[in-house]
């Protein structure tokens, strides 16, 4: 087992994460003298590794996993030595922290242009706009999973479903693109009907937003509508990570839960 081999060379606490992007967000906040991150190649691999860790009673190995749909449609499944992100994934958690979104928009866009475009759409808050868009794509993700439509959701072209005048999602366009990515497994009218039948009710739209969809929507709007001419998805992602300072991070549940996990084992995880 790789964990066992790694532990023979390095006695620090091991922080298992899903991939390189998680490391990019979390590494600046880690106490490198006490712990180090190790990517596992995805959530399935991460959970499987933690189960082996628990079975073999390895000490000081923690997994930080994307929350995804845990606790949204049903109670979250608690697994020893696994701590979930506050929201869908680490990028969503970062963007929803403090005023990260507003700072990213202010530093990469023309302020007057952004305000004018928001006003024209009857909006004032950039984050609220992005959440409204990303949550609709997130709803599609959920319906696709629950109905087993077979839609290729990975790398979904969120920018293609945005109505630039209203800064909202065109559900008609969303259904058409979704059906096209199902290779004939589901018709657009079926997807459209399910989307229309959905009521948000007590659901929090933020819980439906993946980091990919948030960044895709934000970067598209910043570049094409708000004067951020050179802002692509990679630039927006880096800007979010840079704006996610210790101040914002310390206000998250993730920070508190991991800190408590370390304290009960006599180790420091965060440098904040």
Image: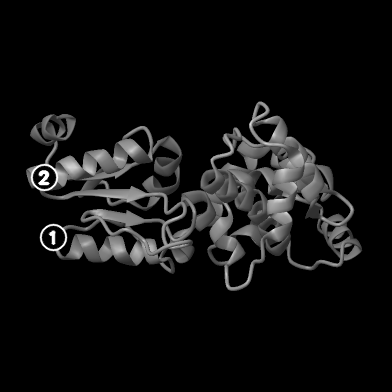
- Taking the spot 16% from the left edge, 40% from the top edge, the residue there is 52
Is residue 100 visible to us here?
yes
Residue 193 or residue 228, whichever sits in front: 193
Query: Looking at the rendered structure, which numbered label has been put on residue 99?
Result: none
The crowd level at tag 2 (other Cα within 10 Å; few <14, some 14-19, many 20+) is: few
Q: Position of 159 compared to 263: left or right?
A: right
Above or below, comparing residue 4 to residue 268 in the picture: above
- Residue 40, position as x, y percentages in the image: 32, 34
Residue bearing the label numbered 2: 55
Q: Please, which residue is most extreme toward the bottom here?
A: 202
Q: Quadrant of the C terminus?
A: bottom left
Query: On the image, which quarter does residue 156 sit in?
Result: top right
Query: On the image, which quarter does residue 182 sit in?
Result: top right
Residue 188 or residue 1, whichever sits in front: 188
- Residue 73, position as x, y percentages in the image: 48, 61
Residue bearing the label numbered 1: 265
- Taking the spot 22% from the left edge, 58% from the top edge, the residue there is 268
Label 2 to label 1: alpha-carbon separation: 18 Å
**Color style of the picture:** one colour
Which of the two discs, 2 and 1, labels the residue nearer the N terminus? Answer: 2
- Taking the spot 68% from the left edge, 28% from the top edge, the residue there is 184
- Residue 192, position as x, y percentages in the image: 74, 48
Residue 148 or residue 237, whichever sits in front: 148
Say which of marks 2 and 1 sits in front: 2
User: SS of the residue at dot 2?
Assistant: helix
Asked if disc 2 and disc 1 are in contact, CB closer than 8 Å, the reply is no
Q: Position of 139 compared to 7: left or right?
A: right
């Amino acid at each position: 087992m790789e964990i066992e081999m790694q532990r023979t060379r390095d006695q620090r606490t091991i922080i298992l994460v899903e991939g390189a992007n998680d490391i990019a967000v979390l590494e600046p906040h880690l106490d490198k003298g006490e712990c180090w991150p190790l990517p596992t190649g995805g959530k399935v691999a991460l959970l499987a590794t933690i189960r082996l860790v628990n079975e073999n009673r390895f000490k000081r190995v923690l997994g930080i996993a994307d929350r995804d749909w845990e606790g949204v449609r049903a109670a979250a499944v608690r697994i020893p030595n696994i701590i979930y992100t506050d929201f869908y994934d680490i990028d969503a958690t970062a963007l929803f922290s403090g005023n990260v979104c507003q700072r990213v928009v202010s530093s990469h866009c023309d302020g007057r242009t952004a305000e004018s475009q928001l006003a024209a759409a009857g909006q004032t808050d950039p984050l609220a706009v992005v959440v409204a868009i990303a949550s609709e794509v997130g709803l599609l993700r959920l319906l696709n999973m629950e109905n087993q439509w077979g839609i290729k959701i990975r790398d979904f072209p969120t920018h293609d479903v945005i109505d630039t005048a209203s800064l909202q999602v065109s559900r008609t366009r969303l259904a058409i693109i979704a059906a096209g990515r199902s290779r004939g497994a589901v018709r657009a009218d079926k997807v459209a009907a399910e989307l229309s039948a959905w009521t948000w009710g007590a659901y929090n739209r933020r819980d439906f937003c993946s980091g990919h969809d948030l960044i895709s929507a934000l970067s598209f709007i910043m570049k094409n509508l708000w004067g951020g001419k050179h802002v692509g998805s990679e630039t927006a992602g880096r800007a979010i990570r840079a704006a996610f300072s210790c101040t914002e991070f310390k206000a998250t549940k993730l920070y508190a839960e991991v800190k408590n996990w370390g304290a009960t084992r006599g180790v420091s995880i965060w440098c904040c």
